[in-house]
Image (cartoon, rainbow, N blue to C red):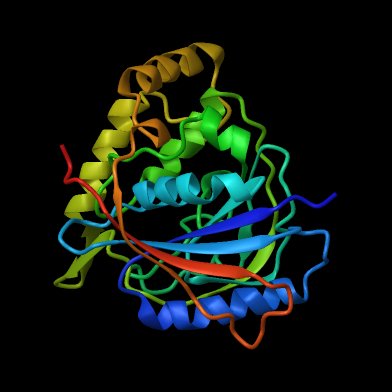
Amino acid sequence: MAKNLGIIAPYRDRAQHLEIFVPHIVAFFSRAPKDIGEDISIMVVQQEHGLEFNRGLMNNIGYSLCKNRCDYVCFHDIDYLPIRADYSEPNGIAPIAWYGAERKTDPRRFTIASNNLEFFFGGVTLFRNGDFEKVNGFANAYWGWGWEDSDIFNRCLVEDIPLERRKGTFTLLPHINTGFDVSGGTVKPSAANMRNGALFKKRFPFLARYRPSQSEIDVNRQVCMKENDGLSTIEFSILDRTSLPSPATDERGVKIEMVTVSIPPTK
């Protein structure tokens, strides 16, 4: 029996992308095999203005709001448009975006640094509910840009969650990559990128983008337990929760919501 799928899309200031993403992904599932997602729901989660964007926290909030109506979830950036991809329930965790995402163009825009799948985790990622809760979700401490995907990937390795790579084909909507500053013809990491990178390296002394040794796992696990930052520590209030109208492309009865939340400032 097919399981219910919840798609969580963290969102901020991408109205043009959202207008393209919703009808596109609904059309994709209208034509996908019916055994992929018995019931499919999409929750777009945005934070009120005033603070730096916190993508990990938006994903955690989205999960907390939809977990009771789905068996597994997909954390989905809205600039990824699926062409051919497998959204079925994973055995563990499954990053599914690859083909179409490996382009290398303007360094200010979102690119993948390597064609090696071992070095890419994010964009569109499937989790079983139990596995997401086992790793305590995303960290809430990464503000502005980047590294929350690296953090949760390391959490999964520490907890020995199976990793299942799927080579999905996607079209990417272009946008400026705020993880980098471009001035005087040079490209360098932004302040947020460097700040979050330093936090990540402090939390994970051994960078586990490879299969780490047991001693390295033990060190990283101790850091994770000490930080205790994630799904269990989220704070938010709902400012607005609105059902979005179904686009003409909907043949599956996909439920679409936009939730606006207020979150406390960084501590």
Foreground pick, 3 / 188: 3
Q: Residue at x 32, y 72 (%)?
A: 176
Residue 174 pos. (x, y %): 42, 77
Residue 255, quarter of picture: bottom right
Foreground pick, 113 / 239: 239
Where 185 sits versus 35, above or below? below
Seen as rendered, the residue at the extreme bottom is 248
Residue 145 pos. (x, y %): 29, 54
Q: Residue at x 32, y 27 (%)?
A: 203
Residue 214 pos. (x, y %): 55, 13
> As drawn, is 122 to the left or to the right of 85?
left
Where 147 sits versus 216, above or below? below
Q: Residue at x 26, y 43 (%)?
A: 196
Q: Residue at x 76, y 58 (%)?
A: 38
Where 86 sits versus 67, above or below? below
Foreground pick, 118 / 263: 263
Q: How many numbered circles does the render carry?
A: 0
> As drawn, is 256 to the left or to the right of 50?
right
Q: Quadrant of the C terminus?
A: top left
Residue 147, quarter of picture: top left
Residue 79 pos. (x, y %): 47, 71
> As drawn, is 105 to the left or to the right of 30?
left
> As drawn, is 264 to the left or to the right of 129?
left
